[in-house]
Every structure is written in C-alpha cells, then in structure tokens.
Image (spheres, rainbow, N blue to C red):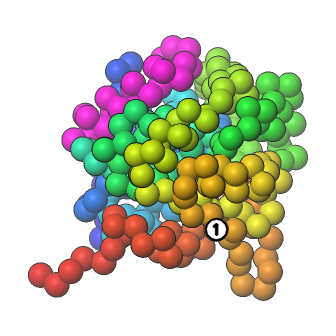
Amino acid sequence: MAARRGTGSTTTGSTLHVPIDIGSGLPVVILEGFGMRPETYRHTATLLAERCRVIVPSLFALPGPWRYPDVLAIFTATLEQLEIDRVTMIGHSFGGGIELGFAARHPKRVEALVFADTLAVSREWVLASEALRHPLGLRAMATKKATSAFVDNLVRHPRQLVGAAWWAFTSGRSEDISKIAAARVPAHVLWANRDTILSRSDGETFARELEASFTVVNAPGDQVIDHDWMFEHPDLFVEHLDLLGLAALAPAGPS
C-alpha cells in the first residue's frame, strides 16, 4: 500500500508546491505538461508508487513571474528539501524541457531520464504558439482532462502560463542536449503513435542527438494513442516504462 506525504504543502517562493508525494523506494519525479496540474497524473503516479516513491510538483503555481532559470533553481531546491540526491525523471511534453535543463546542469544527480512526447529540438513549439494566440482554442487539440487542467491553470496562474509558453516557443535546447549526451546520462524517449501536437520526426531527432532510445507507442488493436496518453492511458504508460528497465522500478530483491 502506497504511503502518502506532503498533500497539503504550499508554495514558499523557494520551493515548488508538491501536492503528490506517494510511495516509498527510489525517487521518481514526474514533470507535468504545459498547463497541466499534478492531479492530472495521479492515476499514473499511484500505479508507479507500488514500486517507488513518486513526486509530482507543480511547475506553474508560482508566486511570481515564470522564468526558466528561476524555475530550475526552485526545482533544484525542492529536491533538496525532499532529501532527494539522485533521481529518475519523467517529463511529459513541456515538462521535458525542465527535465532536460536540470539534467544538463546536474548530470550526476540523474539516475535516468524518460521523455514522453516532449519539447524536443525545434524552437517553434506548436502548443506554445497556440497558447499565446488562442488559449481556449487548445480545447480542439486536447483531451477533456487536459482541457480542464489547462483552463484551471489559466484562471489561477495566467501570467505564469504566458511566461512558460513564451519560453517554450523561443528557447533552444541543443546545448543542453549535447551536455547530457556527453555525460552519457541514460535517456529514453517515448512517443505516441499519433501525436497531433508535437512532431514525431522532431522527437526522433531529439532522441538521436541525446543518444537515447526512441519508442513509438502502440496499443492492442491499433488503437490511436495521442499526446496525452501518459495520463489518459496510465496502464499502457507504465507497461512501456517497464520495458525500459529502469532501476527505480526494478522489483525488490528477496529480503
């Protein structure tokens, strides 16, 4: 039975709000997609928490403007507060950009990296562009669960979402990719078989430059798997994580 921690913590300005911290064992951090909430990933986190400690911080519930260097520093401080020295990271979509930045700066603190339909090598990110121009128009591109989370964040943290979207749209990731590849950090890229938001070819290039494995995710019966599969199909997501042989998810040895 997964133990629960930290369900009522608040943002202090120096650390991120962490509403999900469940399970025990080696730590796994899930970094949310653009405009999503930690709760969006609770089912996925609960499945994983049967074998490891799962932390899902909020990347948008900040007291001030959203600035990439500040978010990286606050994320790092959050790991310190949680007494996490070495971590496996899973970044979905936008969250992969934060994962990439942390790993490039602290490669020795990373056990493994998993990127699910992530910000990759292109500077022009479709979702961020749409968010800046037509925020509510994203409803046509996202699932019901994703739309609900996005609208809630847009109401609660509009300034932070705009800042995050602008960073995603204008930033480049080539330097960080090179640093991680040079450090030989184990990395894996998972991609939905029909992602309508991010380009598969961009993901393939990202994986190649990162020297990471690249897996196109399919489901039985040729089911269409789209951008939000990480939380829309949590059982399928965990099945694909198991295929990666992550140390954090390895069964416990005999006592």
Would residue 37 be seen by someone viewing this image from the given angle?
no
Q: Is residue 210 left or right of residue 75?
A: right
Classify 12 as above or below 54: above
Q: Judge whether residue 206 can be spotted in this image.
A: yes
Asked where in the image residue 95 lies, by quadrant, the reply is top right
Secondary structure state at the residue bearing disc 1? strand
Percent across and percent down for residue 233 are 64, 68
The N terminus: image quadrant: bottom left
Residue at the outermost left position: 255
Nearest the camera: 31 or 146? 31
At 40% from the left and 67% from the top, the residue drawn is 246
Instruction: Give amino acid for label 1.
Output: Thr
* Residue tagged 1: 215
Question: Please, which residue is most extreme toward the top here?
Answer: 64
Percent position of residue 64, x then y: 51, 14
User: Residue visible at 71% across and 24% down?
Assistant: 170
Question: What is the magenta range?
Answer: 63-83
Residue 181 placed where, x, y %?
Answer: 49, 47
Above/below status of 62 relative to 190: above
State the residue lying farthest toward the front.
Answer: 182
